[in-house]
Image (cartoon, rainbow, N blue to C red):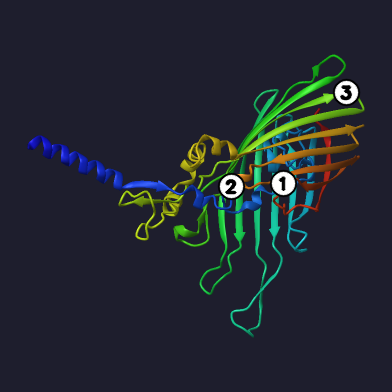
Amino acid sequence: MRKISILSFCAILGQGVYAQQEITLPDLYLSQGMAPITTGVPFLLINADARSAGMGDMGVATSPDAFSQQHNAAKYAFSEKQQGFAISYTPYMASIASDISLAQLNYFNKLNERSAIAASFRYFGMGDIELMESFGAIPVTVSPNELALDVSGSLKLSETFSGAVTLRYISSNLKIPSSNESGAASAVAVDIAGYYQSEVMRNNGFDGRLRAGFAIQNMGPKIKYTDDQFSENFLPTNLRLGVGYDFILDQYNKISAYGEVTKLMVPSHQYPSYIDANGNGEQDANEPTNWHRNEYREKGWFGGMFSSFGDAPGGFSEELKEFTWSLGGEYWYQDSFAFRLGYFHESEMKGARQYATLGAGFRYNIVNIDVSYLFATGATQNPLENSLRFSLTFNFGKNNYK
């Protein structure tokens, strides 16, 4: 009798464990076929540099220029120019609005052969919006905007490798202000970066130079608009890895080829689930869906950076889809005229950004002018489609660090 009782108890216990099984609902989350990673202040990921925009929006391993601050500040240590000042203008969503744009200012100064400092300012304006508290009331005009101010220092650690640290202040003024709240939010972030540039290598028929770079950008605490955790958002912490090679054909012709991969180091949203209380394998009316929003909000930014490499709910295959990749090339003739092309690819599950780019550049004396154009190749419309991006750079100073 005792033996039967023990067996019965074990059977009941087993049924109880089964009855409390958690069932995930991936189809509910993937109803649109997409599971993108979301962050705050995504304007930090918009490329304002027309040169790199013409090569598939890559720049972590390209040759140094005045816009290196946005991609890899360590490149400044290898700049052949002593100083540079650059401005750019990028229309955004030009097909539906004419007053949304991203503007950027950059400045760098080569202190000596081994070190450089730089600063940049980015402003993302979303135009004017008229608000009325009630029908017939006098409208109030608001101008949502976001901005970032950066300073960086770079240093050659050897003849072929440099490192850099960038400090960034971020301000986001998107929330509609109320009587007791300004609606603005701010945050501080840090970038770390490294850059490798080989000596010129002699080959049969041409010279060559290898380049490589990495950057971890926008590392910092969450940005929040109010004091409660429900308004907190992860910063777009981003890992970038790139490699490139210069084919120096002769004194008039040079071709550069580049490749780059990126990944947001931000936690993935988990599939919703429910507790199957009665073990029937179906979600009943008294079994609510858990969207795991509280667990997501409670994750810290530092731990979330590392857990982001293994937290995709779809496993390793979905984790790989969180990487984007781009390929690009640049041709220079007489160091005066440039032609560029590139391609960017993102998994359809993670945002479906897929596009080709074209670009051109002109250099005369101390002035560089660059333009780029984007063609969407996927089903998702790109907000930068059918828009020309412009950059203007002035390189000056007595020294030439070649």
Quarter that holds the N terminus: top left
Q: Which residue is mark 2?
A: 236
Please tell me the numbered disc located at residue 249.
Answer: 3
Labels 1 and 3: the sequence-earlier one: 3
| Mark 2 neighbour class, 10 Å CA radius: few under 14, some 14 to 19, many 20 or more | many
Q: Residue at x 57, y 47 (%)?
A: 189
Q: Nearer the viewer, residue 305 or 275?
A: 275
Q: Give, as a three-letter code, the residue at label 1.
A: Gly
Please tell me the numbered disc located at residue 274.
Answer: none
Q: Residue at x 25, y 41 (%)?
A: 14
Question: Where, by quadrant of the figure, is residue 397 drawn?
Answer: top right
Mark 1 vs mark 2: in front: 1
Horizontally, residue 262 falls left or right of residue 313, namely: right
Residue 313 drawn at (x, y percent): 48, 42
Residue 219 drawn at (x, y percent): 55, 43
Labels 1 and 2: the sequence-earlier one: 2
Please tell me the numbered disc located at residue 378.
Answer: 1
Q: Residue at x 71, y 65 (%)?
A: 127
| Mark 1 neighbour class, 10 Å CA radius: few under 14, some 14 to 19, many 20 or more | some
Q: Nearer the viewer, residue 93 or 214?
A: 93
Mark 3 and mark 2: span between their CA atoms? Answer: 39 Å
Labels 3 and 2: the sequence-earlier one: 2
